[in-house]
Each structure stands twice: as structure tokens, then as C-alpha cells.
Image (spheres, coloured by chain):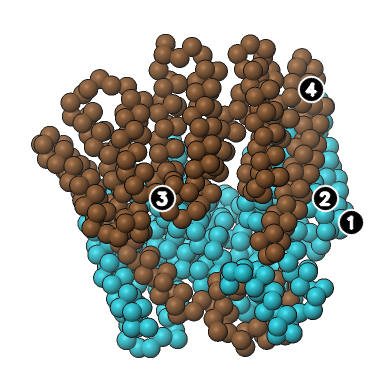
Chain colours: A cyan, B brown
Amino acid sequence: MKTHSVTHLLTLLEQHSIADEEQRKQLADETSNAPWLAFLQTLAAWIAALFVTFAVAGVSGLTKQGSSVIGMVLIGAALWLFWAQRSSLFAKQMALGLSLAGQLLLLYERFAQGTPSLMQGALVAALLAAWPHTSGLHRVVCMVLAFWFACYRSLVLSSPGLLIVVLMTLAAALWLTRRHWSLWSRATYMAALAHAATFLALALLLWRNSQMWSFMRFLAPDVLRDSSYLAYAGGAALLWLACAVWLTRSLVFVQRLWLLGAALVLAMIGFKATPSLLLCLTLALVTFYACQRAWCALSMLCACVLLGLFYYSLHQTLLFKSLSLGAAGCALMVFGWQVRRWKLQG
Amino acid sequence: MQWPLAHIHHILRWAESGLLRAQQVQKLATLAPLEPSRADWLAVGERLCLWGGALLLALAVVFFFAYNWADLHHFAKLAVGAAALLACVATAFASQPTGTVWQAALFGAALCTGALLALIGQIYQTGADIWELFAAWSALMLPFVLLARAWPAWLLCVCISNVCLMRLWHVEGLLHSAATSLALILALNSAWWLLAARCKAWMLVQPSPTVERVAGAFALVAVTCGAAIGMWEAEDFVVYVPLFLAMAGGALWWYRSLRLDVVMLGVVACCAVTVGGSLLSRILFDGREWVFGMFLMAAYVLVASGVSLSWLRDLYRQQHQEVRA
């Protein structure tokens, strides 16, 4: 038996008389949810929701109020399914699809009408996220929608950098305190909030650094702005340093000095050259601390993508980028050598 | 005692779902702190710093050459490519065979081979199509891949050979039709799939299902695209429909009965739902009112995905139990 397997953990629970047979069976069942299954579930639900929305949109003579009523009926059906069949994955999948279709229909034809309609959408999504007896995945999806609708006009289009820093700070704070709030009675909502903030922050990070963002900013400079670059870079560096200070709080003085020194050097390079990479590294560290391996791996993957996009960034010359990367690489190598020494010393 | 990271994740997740009570979690925390140990931090810190540092330094060199590229002489450019390739090979031969450094260095050599070929093509304007570059690259990297015996190197080879066929698709007059191009992609990935499934022992030092899964997914996606189009036309692509049934059926039998692999079964299920959706849309939309069809399609996607996901979760649970047993 592998020492990191669930079976080993369940055996430990048995040996220390922490959980009885019935509870161990429940725990083993709960473990049977792979992240990629949740991804497939969400994807299928979105496709079904889009089919429903297009179908309702195509009904001739249907008014805006009519589509809203259908949307509310679908949301009601979804909530009933969640409540009545809470242990069935099939019912949860149906309910997720119906809920998404209902929310899309409520917003249908209103999206272009401006901020008030989007705030209504955000309110509905937030209410659904807070509704008891739904699934964790549904809560995460609703929270993502609520964030998105609430911030679309105010932040996503005008200062995505600031929004990314806010979301990253929220995600970092939640993951760093995971072992405290996981004991709360409402921990499932906190977990959904942490997942939603992490997902949106990473997605916005990629979007803000992509070529599409630059191209769209070129096409519509009045709509798409990023007026707060200083806040973005400064926020990223501060968040990185704050997390480093928090994570090293229990170390001895010399080691802490080394680590904070290395963090400061990286913060200075990242502040000037690529704050996005600094944010990705921050997220990777805090998710590692929270033992969220999937998010940690995704953050590292995102960092690799950002390094590729960095080549095409128009903010600095290739020479400056080369020097920044070289300096950061040297700092990491020196620090890695020091870590290796500590490892050998035990 | 120290908790492995996976255990801490499970304990906290169970607590968040309300399956473990606060007292139980606190009791577990008294056995060992519920956070990564010093050894975990040192291990990840060392890996992150050394690999990350090497990557950033390599990129710094690439960016620097890109900055000065126009001013460099042809021979200097070729010398850079050749030096990188030689450095990788030298590092591999200076390290312990089949170790991590050996594998990483040979993977780097496989990458450098492509860079050198691209460089030669750029300098001497050989007139070769881009698919020929990728074909030469996938052939010339094979010695390094065979020596490395690591899944990233094999995966690179699989991907480059696929890019070669994708580029070939765009060359006018070379292939008869899109169906022929798809057949080539299907044949290539099926060959990789069979090779990875049957010859894993000599392909890899450490067993990993990645190459088999990726090649299998590519082959299944290719045959699924053919079958989904074949549902709508009765000429070139119709042959893909029975081919899809045979391949999906074979994969289902292999990964369900002989060797349980839920990821591959997930790919098969996705492909089956896609082809089923194509068939249903042919029945519903072919010259008929589309609004009702859209509702039925939505219902189909929800029901089919719900059934597939429930089945996959049961299998996932079964796979875990088999591992436990």
C-alpha cells in the first residue's frame, strides 16, 4: 500500500479510532471525484445551456419577459433537482445545466443594456451560489458568474490589472487560512469562493497578457483601458512579499533573512519586468501551502504560458527582457543552491 | 510523523464537506501539523529554483539572440544552434544514464534538433515546405528519444509528427481530399497508440500512461471528427462511421475489461456523445424546424453527459478500490 494513498489514510483513521466503519465508507466515496470529471461536467452543462438559450431565443414572438419567466422556471427546476436528488451525479449534472441555462436566459437581450442588468445577473448568480443543498461545482460556477457580471463594466474592461490583484489577494488569503476555515460550518462556501477567485484570477491573467487583449485595446482604446499599471505591478509585488513574510514566519532568523532577501530581489525584478509572473508564482506557493496540487500545477503551467507571451510584450525591449530574465534566473539558481545546502544539512 | 500532501488535502476537503468533524480534524492535527513539512518545502523549493532558474537563463539567452538576430552572421547563428545541441548531448553523456538529468538533456537535444533544422532552412532558403521540416525533425529526434526513454520526449515526437501531417493537409494537390488527410492522421496516431500500449517496457524507464493516453485521444478524436462529418454526407467520410464504431468499441473493451483506465474511457465517452450528437442533429435539423431540435439537443447533451459521468465516477471509484485491494 502506498503511504500517500487514501487507503493508508483511512487505515490511520481506523488505527487512531478517529472514524468508524460507516464514516470511513462515506469518506472513501467522497474521494471518488477527479478534477477532470468536474471539468467535463461543467463543459457539458455549458453546451446544454447554450442549446437551451438559442432554442428559446429562436421561439418566434417570445418577449423579453417570456424568456425571463422560462429562465426562472429552469432555475426553479434546477434547485428542486438539487434538493430532491442530492446524492445522484446524474441529477446534479441536469441541475447544473438547467441552472446555467436559466441564468443565461435571465440575462438574454439585457446584456447590451448596461450595468443595471449585469448587476441583476450578478445578484441572481450570487443568490444561487448562496443557496443551500446545491453542489460544490454549482456554487463555484455561480460565484464565477457573480464576480464576472458584477465587475464586467467597472473593472474587466477598464482596469483588469487591479481586478486581478484583488482576486489574487482574496485567493491567497483564503488558501493561506484554509486549515482554519475548513473547520467552520460554512466551509463549503469558503471553498467555493477560493476556487472561484483562483479560477477567475488565472483566466484574467492570461486574458490580460494575451495578444487578443492588445489587439482589442488597439481596436477600442476608449472601452478597453488599463489605467492602473502601477497599482497592478505594485500590488503584485506587495502581495508576493506579504505571502513570503507570512509563509516564512516560523523559520529561524538566518533562513528567513535568506528567503525574504530572495523574495525581495524577485519582487524588484518582477515589479519592473513582469508582475503577472510574480502573481502566478504567488498563487503556486499559496496553493502548495494549502495542499491544492491541481491549482498549484495549473499556476505553474500558467507561468510557463506567460513566459511565452512575455516575448511578444510590447512594454519593454528584448534586451531589457533578456536582462530581467537573466537576473531572475541567476537569483533563482543561487537560492536553489542554498536550499540544496539546507536539504543536505537536514 | 509527517502527513503527505495528498493526505492533508483529503483531510481538509473532507472537513470542508462536513464529513469530518472539527474534533476529528483537531485529533488528526495532533498527530502531525496539517501543513507541508520542512522536507516538502525544501524538495519543492530546490526543484522550483533549479529548474526555474535554468529555464529563465535559457530564455534570457534566447531573448538576447533574438535582440541581436539581424546583426549575427550566418555562421554565428548556426554555431549557436549547434552549440546548444552539443551542450545537451554532452550533458547527457556526462550524467548517469536513465537519470533525470540524462532524460532532460536528451529532451533538450530533441528540441535543439528542430531549432537547428529551422535555422538551416531560414539561412539557406532551401525551398522545403514546412511539413518537410517537421517530418525531418520527428525522424532526426528519434535517436535522442529512444535513448532518453522518457514520456516527455515521446510526447514531443508524437506531437511533432502530428504537426507534420497537419501542415501536409494544407499543401494543395498533394493529398486527394480532407478524408485522406484525416485517414493519415488516424493511421499515424493509431500506430503510436498501439506502440505505446504494447511496448511500454522498452519505451520508458518509469512506467507512465501519458503517451498512450495522448496518442489514443488523438486517434479517437480523428476518427470522431470523421464519423461526425460522415453522419451528414454519404461520400468520403461515411467510411469513418463503422471505423468509429470498431475503434470506440475496441477501446471500450480494452480499457474496461482488460485494463481499467477511466481517463481513456472518459475520452471514449466524450467521442461517443459527440458522434451521437451529430447523428441526432442530422435527424432533427435536416430541413426541419430548428427550435424544437435545439431543445432536444440540450436534453440529449444533459442526459448523455449525466449518464456518462455517473458511469465514469462509478468506474473511478472501482479503480480506487482495485488499487486499495
Q: Position of residue B209 (x, y in %)?
A: 54, 49
Tell me which label, 2 or 1, sits earlier in the chain: 1
Q: CA distance from mark 4 to mark 3?
A: 48 Å
Marker disc for residue B150: 3
Classify 10 Å Cα crowding around label 4: few (below 14), some (14-19), many (20 and above).
some
Q: Which residue is mark 1?
A: A84
Q: CA distance from mark 2 to mark 3?
A: 42 Å
What amino acid type should be assigned to the residue bearing mark 1?
A: Ala
Q: CA distance from mark 1 to mark 3?
A: 49 Å
Q: Quadrant of residue A178?
A: bottom right
Q: Is residue A84 left or right of residue A119?
A: right
Q: Which residue is mark 4?
A: B284
Classify 10 Å Cα crowding around label 1: few (below 14), some (14-19), many (20 and above).
few
Q: CA distance from mark 2 to mark 1?
A: 9 Å
Secondary structure category for the residue under label 2? helix
Whether label 2 touches label 3, CB < 8 Å:
no
Q: Chain of mark 1?
A: A
Image quadrant holding the C terminus of chain A, namely bottom left
Q: CA distance from mark 4 to mark 2?
A: 25 Å
Q: Position of residue A116 (x, y in %)?
A: 67, 49
Q: Which residue is mark 2?
A: A91
Q: Quadrant of residue B28?
A: bottom right
Whether label 4 touches label 3, CB < 8 Å:
no
Q: Chain of mark 3?
A: B
Whether label 2 touches label 1, CB < 8 Å:
yes
Same-chain check, marks 4 and 2: no
Q: Residue furthest right?
A: A84
Q: Chain of mark 4?
A: B
What amino acid type should be assigned to the residue bearing mark 4?
A: Leu
